[in-house]
Structure formats: structure tokens, C-alpha cells
Image (cartoon, grey):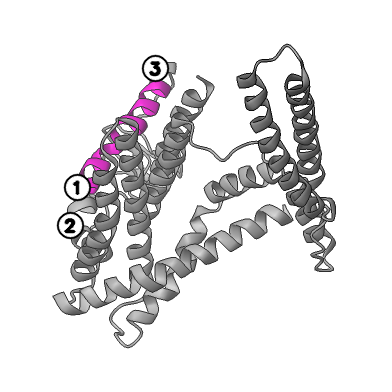
Amino acid sequence: MSGEIEGVGDVATGVLLARAVDRQATGSGTGEGLCLNCGTARIGPHCHECGQGGHIHRSIGAIWHDLLHGVLHFEGKLWRTLPLLTFRPGELMRRYIDGERARFVSPMAMFLFSVFSLFAVLTILGIAPPSEISGNTAQVQAGLEQQRTAMVARRDRAVTTRDEGSADAAERAEATRDIAEIDEAIAALDQVGPVFATRTNDSGLRTGWARLDKGIEKAEKNPGLMLYKLQANSYKFSWLLIPISIPFIWIMFAWRRQFRAYDHAVFVTYSIAFMSLLFIVLMLLNAAGVAFPLIATIGTFAPAIHIYRQLRGGYGLRRTTAILRMLVLTAVSIPVIISLFLVAVLGLGIVG
């Protein structure tokens, strides 16, 4: 139950944070007068200098109204942005870059909303790395010895049954077969045991950086905690995907000077937001019992189609050049980007 509550809280937090990034809540109202925020004389319901509304709420009801408005409505922008982001991402990207900003959720706000929602759904569905993974070879060796002791005891019982005068021929034959099988298992354990007996928890990897070496030692002792920190850092540092990705997009358009780094940042941020939302849909379909082949098909082709449409519409490419760039992104750039991101997150987890 706590996971579901935490997940819902993540969704609400993500929407409110995205709303704050997209545009500061400034109230509403009508009339003229001095702005209570900056002192400028208003000529309408909002201050033309800072944007604050003339009517200021001071009630508990207004707090709840702002919360519900932010979470459920997102000022209407979300419902204008999502259809374009899903079906016409290139048009959304180009319209936003060309200055049509007030109608749509900004790329960063959309990114925040999608990432918070993704990890909220992960929490609600209980998808998380195992909390306990034994990376201690001494524990493995102790388990093998315990198993060998149990097999020896079982063999002794079989020998007793075989040698008893009261046992019939069938019981003695079964006991003899059991003894043979147990002897084979014990021999296998005797071969595996020395391998773990010669190993220790220390991998021998030392960098000379005390903080990093300490992190490596902790990861060896408690891999489960390391996996948890990896997931948590993926959540907290997901924004690193944006600066990591931009150079790969820039390389593909380096000779086309009409496109700037800002264009590539908008492309990357909207694209990551869509991929996060798509992953949410796939997880929900899986939880609803939808056939896995259908989910796999969507997960395979939807990202490529989306990238193609965003490239073609956002950069005004021809069909062939858009397909070629899409193939480069999906086959080369994205695997490298994900690898760099995981290395960065893993390093932050170990050092932290």
C-alpha cells in the first residue's frame, strides 16, 4: 500500500514541478491597480512586468484549488501537447522552436512530468531490483557445505535402509540407486567447493581514490544495495540523458547551420519524454495481461517510428535522409548514450 501512495505522490510532485518550470503560478483576477509583487501599475488582470495576477487568494480552499488545477489540468497545455507529442512530434518541436510556446508544455516540463510519472508507475507496480543479493563468496561456500552435510546424512539413511535385514528387495534396490545419485552430487560439490574457497570478497580492484575504492568494497559486500542506488540515481540524474544526447544529434546536423544546439535540445528532451510515457504504457499493458508479443512489437517499432517522424517534421528532412538518421540514432547513437548514462549513474552510485 505504501508503494502505491508513494507512486501517486511522485505523479503529483512531477506535475506540480513541471508546472512550476513551465510557468510560475501567478494567480488571476481583473481590474487595475498596483501589482502586489513588483509595484508596477497594472493595465489588466495580470501585471505586464512580472505576470502576477491582480486577485490574490488567501484561503485554504485556494490551496486545494491550485493543487487540483496543477495536477489534473496542467492548465490545459498537457492535453494540447500529448497528442502532438505522440502522433506529430516533428510539428510540435518546430512550432515550439519557432515561438509558439504558450500553447504547449515546454520540453523540460514535459520531461519532468514523464520521468516522475515513470518512476511513480514503477513504484506502484512494485518493479524494483532485488533488495538482497549475496555477493559474499564465504556465504556461498557455507551454503555448499551445508548442502553437502545434508546429502551425507541422506546417504547414511539410504545405506541403513539398504543394509537392514527387514527391507525387501525393492527397497534395497531403491536405496542403492539413491546412494549412487547422492555420491555423484557430493562429487560435484567437492569439485565446485574449492573454487569458492579460494575466492574472497575483495576483487582486488583498487584505483588509488579512497572514496571510489570504499564504494567498490561496499558494492561487493552488498550488491542489492548497489542495485537500489543505481535505480535511485537513474531517477535523480535522468536529466543527464539530455546533455549526453545533444552532441550525437549535433553531429548529424553539423553542416546545417540553420539548426542550433537549442533545436537539438528540444528534440532530445521531447523525445525522452515520449519514450518515458511509452514505457509507462507498455508496463500498464503488461500489468493488464496484454499478450507479450503485442507489447514487444509496440516497444520495438514505436520508438523508431516516433524518431523518424520527429526528425522529418522537426528538421524538414526528406523521407530517405530521415530514415538514414533514424537508423543511425537507433542502431548506434542510442546504445552509446544509454551506456554512457549507465556508466555515469553507476559511478555516482559507487562514489556516493
Q: Nearer the viewer, residue 287 or 33?
A: 287
Residue name at image x 41 percent, y 75 percent: 248
Instruction: Estimate the x, y position of residue 100 in percent, counting from the top left.
Output: 22, 58
Q: Which numbered disc covers residue 88?
A: 2
What residue type is disc 2 on? Arg
Task: Find disc 3 in the rendering and name its residue.
Answer: 61
Q: Pointer 1: residues within 10 angstroms few (<14), some, or many (20+)? A: few
Instruction: Estimate the x, y position of residue 112 in percent, counting from the top left.
Output: 43, 47
Task: Find disc 1 in the rendering and name its residue.
Answer: 83
> What residue range appears in magenta?
61-82
Considering the numbered disc 1 on the image, is that residue within a helix, a strand or a loop?
helix
User: How many marks can you see?
Assistant: 3
Q: CA distance from mark 2 to mark 3?
A: 38 Å
**Main structural element of the magenta stretch: helix, strand or loop?**
helix
Instruction: Estimate the x, y position of residue 350 in percent, counting from the top left.
Output: 71, 55
Q: Pointer 3: residues within 10 angstroms few (<14), some, or many (20+)? A: few
Considering the numbered disc 3 on the image, is that residue within a helix, a strand or a loop?
helix
Residue name at image x 29 percent, y 42 percent: 292
